[in-house]
């Protein structure tokens, strides 16, 4: 599976200012979010969770071949299985969830599993985060902008409140496409900002370059 802009943005934008000790990456795919957090922080325990067998194998291989192999571990399990078995709490939880809820599917079951939110309904995700997040922890997620209000409302029912929101546009005249949201158990004023990715095809804005340049070989 290719690494998408959503994952790169979330991995770069997620706050590590609180110096998290333990991190959980829900639905890790190839492991790019975990690897970015390993690069950006001193977190000693970074656990990734992936239900698809092929993606799990690729994630594990990427972890083993990285400079941070001793801090990274990937589980092959569903989210609800993980919640039932794990008593640990995490200082940071990150997730780039499947959210293609339109009524079409491809012939590739693995890609469907990664892309469709019936593999990980938002209610399951929020319930799990509320049970796994430490008292002072942060939960960072990327979702379609059209789902932002609904997701925040669902999260508030579990005592999770938005601290920061980054709304992402492809270019200045396009509609807002994604929302990156940081939640905690502390209710406060929400810092809302906007990011434009490109001025023209492959011509990136200064803001996008500043946020992501540490993760691209050519930027």
Image (tube, grey):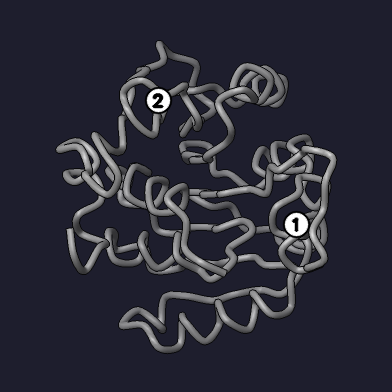
Residue contact at pointers 1 and 2, CB within 8 angstroms: no
Q: Is residue 201 left or right of residue 81?
A: left
Rendered position, 178 above or below 58: above
Q: Secondary structure at mark 1?
A: helix
> Which residue is disc 1 drawn over?
79
Mark 1 → mark 2, Cα distance in angstroms = 25 Å
Residue at 65% across / 19% down in the picture?
156
Q: Nearer the viewer, residue 134 or 126?
A: 126
- Residue 219, given in percent of the width and then of the height, sits at 17, 58
Left or right of residue 38: residue 145 = right
Q: Is residue 91 above or below residue 217?
A: above
Q: Nearer the viewer, residue 91 or 143?
A: 143
**SS class, disc 2:** strand
In the rendered image, residue 4, in percent from the top left (x then y), is placed at 47, 56
Residue 44: x %, y % from top left: 38, 68
Q: Is residue 212 above or below residue 139?
A: below
Q: Residue at x 50, y 16 (%)?
A: 187
Front residue of this view, candidates 8 and 33: 8
Residue appearing at x 37%, y 59% in the figure:
37
Q: In the orientation shown, which residue stands out farthest toward the front?
A: 201
Picture quarter containing residue 112?
bottom right
What's the mark number on residue 159?
none
Residue 184, given in percent of the width and then of the height, sits at: 50, 30
Which residue does the image show at 55% across and 58% down from the upper left?
A: 25
Q: Quadrant of the N terminus?
A: bottom right
In the image, is residue 122 above or below residue 47?
above
Judging by the rendered image, the residue that carries numbered circle 2 is: 164
Snapshot quadrant of residue 68: bottom left
Which of the two residues, 177 or 29, is positioned nearer the viewer here? 177
Crowdedness of circle 2 by 10 Å Cα count: few (<14), some, many (20+)? Answer: some
| Mark nearer the N terminus (1 vs 2) | 1
Does residue 68 appear left or right of residue 206 in this picture? right
């Amino acid at each position: 599976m290719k690494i998408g802009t959503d994952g790169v943005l979330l991995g770069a934008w997620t706050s590590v200012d609180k110096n998290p000790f333990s991190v959980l990456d829900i639905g890790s795919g190839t492991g790019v979010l975990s690897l970015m957090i390993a690069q950006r922080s001193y977190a000693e325990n970074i656990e990734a969770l992936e239900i698809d067998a092929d993606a799990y194998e690729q994630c594990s291989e990427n972890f083993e071949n990285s400079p941070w192999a001793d801090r990274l571990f990937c589980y092959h399990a569903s989210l609800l299985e993980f919640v039932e078995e794990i008593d640990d709490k995490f200082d940071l939880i990150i997730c780039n969830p499947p959210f293609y809820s339109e009524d079409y599917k491809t012939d590739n079951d693995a890609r469907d599993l990664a892309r469709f939110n019936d593999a990980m309904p938002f209610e399951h995700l929020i319930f799990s985060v509320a049970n796994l997040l430490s008292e002072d922890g942060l939960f960072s997620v990327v979702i379609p902008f059209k789902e932002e209000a609904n997701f925040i409302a669902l999260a508030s029912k579990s005592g999770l409140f938005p601290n920061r929101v980054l709304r992402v546009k492809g270019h200045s005249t396009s509609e807002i496409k994604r929302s990156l949201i940081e939640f905690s158990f502390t209710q406060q004023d929400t810092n809302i900002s906007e990011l434009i990715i490109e001025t023209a095809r492959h011509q990136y804005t200064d803001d996008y370059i500043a946020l992501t340049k540490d993760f691209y070989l050519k930027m």
